[in-house]
Amino acid sequence: MTGDHDHTDPPSDEALRVKALESLLVDKGLINPDAVDAIIEQFETQIGPHNGAKVVARAWVDSAYRARLIDDAWPALQELDVGGVEASEVVVLENTEDVHNLVVCTLFSCYPWALLGLPPSWYKSPAYRSRAVKDPRALLAEFGLKIPTEREVRVWDSNADIRYLVLPERPAGTEDLSENDLAALVTRDAMVGIGLVSPSGD
Amino acid sequence: MDGIHDMGGMDGFGAVEREAEEPVFHAEWERRAVGMVMSMFAQRLFHLDEYRQKIERMAPIAYPGPYYARWIHAASELLLEKGLLSRAEFESGAAAGKAEDVDLIAAATVPDLLRARISGRETDDVPARFKPSDAVRARNIHPQYHTRTPRYVRGKTGLVERDYGVFTLPDSYAKNTGKTPQHVYSVRVTARELWGPDASERDSLYIDMWDDYLEPA
């Protein structure tokens, strides 16, 4: 989104430092600038929550797929040609009327990149990392999600190699939608567990 | 180490602020930082556990700065430590010759690299010390180096939910003293065990624990 930037601002310390380092690494033969560009392009155009949404929508319309996905995610992800970087050991957590799942990484920012893209700022923030494990209900309420007391909240701290993807509940009133239309409703927030999927896509 | 990075359960950070329609990157330097650091990971100039360790050793007051500045900090420290850059090169920005034995990745291979299945899973046939439904306690350890057992679970008791198989132990691999392959389990700890009687009776935390982090309870 560099086009939004006001070019009269002086470059930040980080901008200057990274520019100098990149130039040094290229001169030293430690990086290939074309590969750097290719990686950025992947994160800006190919790797994002639309990949996870595809998986969720398929699980909603195909119960055999959902069972395979929950049993052993990697082969099921391959069926849809997704998974990979930071999403090689995926465990899918199914939300039900009795259980709500919430994912956090208290130690840094572990997140299923290949399915959801790079993590958003709030996921990496000290506020989220500190509070999600200690008082998830209050945190979810701030996000507008009031979990009834009789519904269990399970918080998953991604501190190892496993990356967690929440399979949200399919909203009522979506029985007539196609798999593609369903995928368009599924948000990143719902796949981390801080939101629900709305039948109107809000 | 008991560092600033280990934030689970801390108070005082306020509300979680969310940006509507957040872009993938907020500045050009963030884009370049991700591309550079990911390139160097792909070229195996360093690995994730030693990289995390560098981030965790940042001064607590410096840590809360921009997220991708932590990436740049850790990568720079590792390049210096491994002699891939000299201090003089790093400070002047001028390369004294080319690095040897570095296989640069080609742009055309990037999509496949990012689709590849890569993790710390190991094929070693290591016996599991625990099995599902076993009662376990997170050992009360405070290593000075890297560990993935957060403070808030140490000394707490839970039940093994699932055995995920055998993985590299980050504690030893971060020091490059060996992969120490061992089982990792999903362990369920009740919210009340962690946070006391005011916590919800119904809720639980699931955390992934290596064999070395656990003892029978």
Image (cartoon, rainbow, N blue to C red):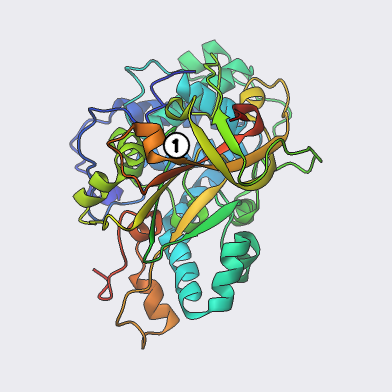
Whether residue B103 is visible: no
Of B193 and B139, the residue lying toward us: B193
Residue type indicated by callout 1? Ala
Of A174 and B120, the residue lying toward us: A174
Q: Residue furthest right?
A: B125
Q: Residue furthest bottom?
A: A176
What residue is shown at x 18% (from left), y 37% (from top)?
A8
What residue is shown at x 38% (from left), y 69% (from top)?
A169
Can you say whether A81 is above or below A125 in the image? below
* Residue designated by label 1: B33
| Quarter where residue B46 is shown | top right
Residue A56 at x, y = what percent?
46, 69
Left or right, residue A157 beside residue B163: left
Q: Chain of mark 1?
A: B
Can you say whether A108 is above or below B202 in the image? above
Left or right, residue B102 beside residue B76: right
What residue is shown at x 55% (from left), y 22% (from top)?
B146
Residue A136 at x, y = what percent?
31, 45
Residue A102 at x, y = what percent?
38, 51
